[in-house]
Image (cartoon, rainbow, N blue to C red):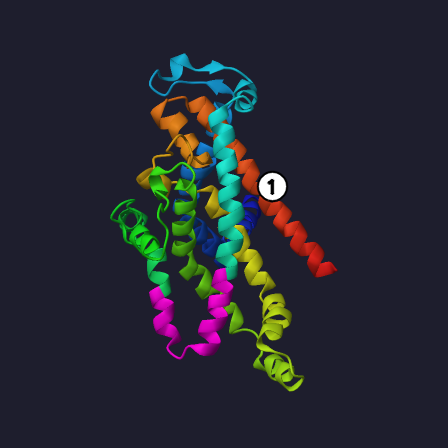
Amino acid sequence: MSMAIVGSKERHKKKWWNQNSKEAVVGWLFLAPEAIGIITLAIFPLIFSLFLSFTNWNLVGGFEEMDWVGFDNFQRMFSDSKFLKALQNNIFFTAITVPVGLVMSMIMAVIVHTKVYTKDLFKILFFIPYICSTVAIAAVWAALYQPSNGPINRFLMQIGFDNPPKWLVDSEYAIVAIMIIAIWQALGYQLIIFLAGITQISEEMYESADIDGATGIQQFWYITVPMLAPTTLFLTITTIIGSFKVFDLIKFLTDGGPNDASTVLVYRIYEEGFINFRMGYASALSWVLFLIVIAVTSITWIIQAREKNA
């Protein structure tokens, strides 16, 4: 009887510990470092920042000085003029850089695809700014924007502008100057993605349009643009998210100034968390930014889905 029980257990063990089980264990062992990294560096900070957003905590004071304040941090935002200014700047930044960058990159992708013979060379040239150090790019543009001796203002004066903008030191043009850099830097990446989408469009569609007498503009509007809709959606979402994350250019070039003219949400979070050391309020700001990005992305998805079903 006992031998039968032992044999049954052995068969059950062999049935469970088979080749598939071994492969599964090996797979989980390979995934374990990544899973631990995600939990440690992503999930835990996310949950901890949500907890901090309901507290008043000075980073220098330690955990002993952490006070629970509920929704006070979120209510405070509506009376925080710096936050409202940063939100306004960020919306303006996104509303201009996203559509302008996408339109320019799509048109340039069509031109490179149809009119340029050395496409690979142009891809490399346009992609270089995207992979270069943002600090290095900002340093070059700072020299270009120099108010008195910069090449841009010298050119403007030569063509008739007596008082060209002071760009980075002008409260009216600081955010515009950074937007120009952001569009220029992302242009190469967007162009390559659009080129990849254009190569998937059948040439027979353009040949049929030529036979029917369609002009180049008509082919672009009625064939290229609709066929690139999935690519445009992808770039729209990633570009919107990127526009709300802009920080390095602003930190290097203007430090949020002059007079908070170029302050955006991420810079405001940095200012509260690592300059004023108010980590509770900074965490609340970061969650508001997270919700804004989720809302804008969801709206983009919904609009695209309705257009597809129409």
User: Front-most of 291 and 94?
Assistant: 94
Instruction: State which region is magenta.
Output: 104-125
> What residue is drawn where x is 46% and y is 56%?
23
Residue at image location 34% in from the left, 35% down from the top: 255
Can you name the residue that lies furthest to the bottom here?
211
Q: Secondary structure at mark 1?
A: helix
Q: Residues within 10 Å of mark 1 (few under 14, many from 20)?
A: few
Q: Quadrant of the N terminus?
A: top right
Q: Residue furthest right?
A: 310
The answer to whether residue 142 of the structure is visible from this angle is yes
Q: Nearer the viewer, residue 292 or 125?
A: 125
| 246 w.r.t. 131: above or below | above
Q: Nearer the viewer, residue 243 or 154?
A: 154
Check disc 1 and report the residue beneath it.
Answer: 295
Which residue reaches farthest left?
A: 149
- Give the image location of residue 87, x and y in percent: 51, 34
Q: What predominant SS class does the magenta segment belong to?
A: helix
Quarter in which the C terminus is drawn? bottom right
**Percent x, y of residue 284:** 50, 27
Where is residue 264 drawn, in percent x and y?
45, 36
The answer to whether residue 175 is above or below residue 144 is above
Q: Quadrant of residue 205?
A: bottom right
The amino acid at mark 1 is: Ala
Q: Is residue 170 left or right of residue 51?
A: left
Whether residue 47 appears in this view of the structure is no
Q: Is residue 231 above or below residue 91?
A: below
Residue lying at 27% horizontally and 50% vertically, measured from the top left: 150
Q: Report if residue 137 lies within the magenta region.
A: no
Q: Would residue 50 appear left or right of 34 to someone viewing this image?
A: right
